[in-house]
């Protein structure tokens, strides 16, 4: 099976094939995995860290890929297969959590900074659920797969996160829909 | 206790649920979780939440508040990664790869049934005696004459039946890595040289980074063609109204780079059903000048269409990734039409009301409003655009009694 190209939307089978080849020590497969998924993973990390944190984002992304490579033998197979782009968000979230001091900095000014501050106040999976739902616009099923929990659990986590953010940062009295 | 052991034996780790996409999609949600899941899907479709949904649900209010902010955050990190980072990471990780496994060598092909290499087969005796005079010069001459004749015949046929041209300048349909419909590019065409995206035969699809523009004037200043917007109403069997939700521009290089920019317009389409009920659906448009639009026909079906005299291609299928990287995963209609050097791509879900008939009607309406080919300056050609309504315009333009507009005729050419 040929490896997917950089601009393709890889299928689950192609993701599985990549994982299998990497586990077999195929350097070309590793290069392809990096070229396919480094950009999206970096973007997610940078969105969470905020502008001005590009260096940290690169370090976190690198750490996420290192962990992903170590865990590649545990890449889910069969009917439990998870798209690689979602599976890679798991080590990215763990790497972000390890740098909690830098995570969700208030950089960027205005509302985006407030949002990151709010996310920084959340714990573990609640912060991950809110960040992936908001920044990556993951639909509920993908959010569940990225978190490694059921869809119901993912929605509960997101609801709790939104509740906590809403209480910590209530809307201004003049806030209105679309404003 | 026995039951617990049995459960552990069958499911491996009892703490970890067996997750799969199909299983997750079947999973039933509670009322509150279901509302939140529906709200996420709705926002992803580009449809803002409304007050009725959020009433008594403070979490949805927070979601509606945060969503526009998150949209701004999404523009972060769209620049290319620092040069060399990918290679250095690959080198670093490559060292921790396990040693390459030797692939099992392919077994030598077995001989056919009934044949054994152990049985010697004797060569047959040569019966013909070779000629003493060489006929090589005659054979060479005959070959040359035959070649000339074939060439002349081919030239004659080519003159009588010229190669059919697609008539489409900027639209390409690819199937199995081949051009099923090749664009007739103008002789002076030069492929855009944009550092962040390059479309080549080996990388035929590009994802571009769109940055939201707050109003039409700012968006217009970033492109070198007049941005065309959808009509507010259109009749395609029944009445549809459109609301512009967002305008975004993808520059070729950095900000303020005008040539080869692309515009994305996110619309909300309201449709009054015959029974008076209202349906809402998302429709996204991409516009670009002198840029090839490629459609992948490996999946789905496609055909050539005309809408109001404009030619185009309609593709439909279940999986489409648009040029801003959004995935459209269900019954998706993609219509690409050309007006001069500008291509307009419409993307929407057929099962949400964005039908072929509607797309053709919209393209037809837009075509009538577009300036003639060769109109040089968009700013000079069009009056200054009005300010775009910001996100969340739902409910700001009430449905009125609308005039009926004759529907466009979509002509299938292929």
Image: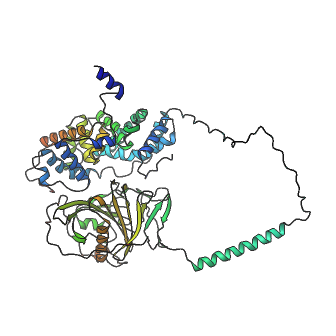
Q: Examine the image and state in which quarter residue A92 appears.
A: top left
Q: Position of residue B321 (x, y in %)?
A: 37, 55
Q: Nearer the viewer, residue B370 or B15?
A: B15
Q: Quadrant of the C terminus of chain B?
A: bottom left
Q: Can residue A109 be seen by looking at this rendering? A: no
Q: Is residue A139 above or below residue B167?
A: above
Q: Residue at x 19, y 55 (%)?
A: B48
Q: Residue furthest left?
A: A173
Residue in the picture at 71% in, 42% down: B114
Within the image, what quadrant is residue A130 found in? top left
Residue A84 seen: yes
As drawn, the residue found furthest toward the front would be B114
As drawn, B14 above or below B227: above
**In this orientation, which residue lies closer to the viewer: B214 or B406?**
B406
Position above or below: B258 against B164: above
The location of residue A53, given as percent across then percent down, is: 30, 43
- Give the x, y percent position of residue B141: 79, 71
Picture coordinates of residue B138 (x, y %)? 83, 70
On screen, residue B306 versus residue B407, left or right, reads right
Q: Does residue A85 appear to the left or right of B184 in the view shown? A: left
């Amino acid at each position: 099976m040929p490896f997917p190209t950089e601009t393709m939307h890889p299928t689950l089978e192609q993701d599985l094939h990549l994982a299998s080849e990497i586990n077999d020590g195929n350097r070309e497969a590793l290069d392809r995995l990096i070229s396919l998924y480094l950009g999206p993973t970096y973007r997610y990390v940078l969105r969470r860290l905020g502008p001005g944190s590009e260096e940290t984002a690169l370090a976190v992304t690198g750490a996420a890929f290192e962990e992903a490579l170590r865990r590649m033998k545990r890449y889910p197979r069969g009917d439990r297969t998870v798209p690689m782009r979602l599976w890679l968000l798991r080590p990215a979230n763990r790497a972000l959590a390890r740098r909690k001091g830098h995570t969700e900095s208030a950089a960027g000014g205005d509302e985006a900074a407030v949002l990151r501050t709010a996310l920084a106040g959340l714990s573990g999976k609640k912060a991950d659920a809110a960040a992936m739902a908001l920044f990556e616009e993951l639909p509920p099923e993908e959010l569940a797969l990225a978190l490694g929990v059921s869809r119901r659990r993912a929605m509960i986590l997101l609801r709790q996160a939104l509740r906590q953010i809403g209480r910590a940062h209530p809307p201004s009295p003049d806030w209105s829909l679309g404003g | 206790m026995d039951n617990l052991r049995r459960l552990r034996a069958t499911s491996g780790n009892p703490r970890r649920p067996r997750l799969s996409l199909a299983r997750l999609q079947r999973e039933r949600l509670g009322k509150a979780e279901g509302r939140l899941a529906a709200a996420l899907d709705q926002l992803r479709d580009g449809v803002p939440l409304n007050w009725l949904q959020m009433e008594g649900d403070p979490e949805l209010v927070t979601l509606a508040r945060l969503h526009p902010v998150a949209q701004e955050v999404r523009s972060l990190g769209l620049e290319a990664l620092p040069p060399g980072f990918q290679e250095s990471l690959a080198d670093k990780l490559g060292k921790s790869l396990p040693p390459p496994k030797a692939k099992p060598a392919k077994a030598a092909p077995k001989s056919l049934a009934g044949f054994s290499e152990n049985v010697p087969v004797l060569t047959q005796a040569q019966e013909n005696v070779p000629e003493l005079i060489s006929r090589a010069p005659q054979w060479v001459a005959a070959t040359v004459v035959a070649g000339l004749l074939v060439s002349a015949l081919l030239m004659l046929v080519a003159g009588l039946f010229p190669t059919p041209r697609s008539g489409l300048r900027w639209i390409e349909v690819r199937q199995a890595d081949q051009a099923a419909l090749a664009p007739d590019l103008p002789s002076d065409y030069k492929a855009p040289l944009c550092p962040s995206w390059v479309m080549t035969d080996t990388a035929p699809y590009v994802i571009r980074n769109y940055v939201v523009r707050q109003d039409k004037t700012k968006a217009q200043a970033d492109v070198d063609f007049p941005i065309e917007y959808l009509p507010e109403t259109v009749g395609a069997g029944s009445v549809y109204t459109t609301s512009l939700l967002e305008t975004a521009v993808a520059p070729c290089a950095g900000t303020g780079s005008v040539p080869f920019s692309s515009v994305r317009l996110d619309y909300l389409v309201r449709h009054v059903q015959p029974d008076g009920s209202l349906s809402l659906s998302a429709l996204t448009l991409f516009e670009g000048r002198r840029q090839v639009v490629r459609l992948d026909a490996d999946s789905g079906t496609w055909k050539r269409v005309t809408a109001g005299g404009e030619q185009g291609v309609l593709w439909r299928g279940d999986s489409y990734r648009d040029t801003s990287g959004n995935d459209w995963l269900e019954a998706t209609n993609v219509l690409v039409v050309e007006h001069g050097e500008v291509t307009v791509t419409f993307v929407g879900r057929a099962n949400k009301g964005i039908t072929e008939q509607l797309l053709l009607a919209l393209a037809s309406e837009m075509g009538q409003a577009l300036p003639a080919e060769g109109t040089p300056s968009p700013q000079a050609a069009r009056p200054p655009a009005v300010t775009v309504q910001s996100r969340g315009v739902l409910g700001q333009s009430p449905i009125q009694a609308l005039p009926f507009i004759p529907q466009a005729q979509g002509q299938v050419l292929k």
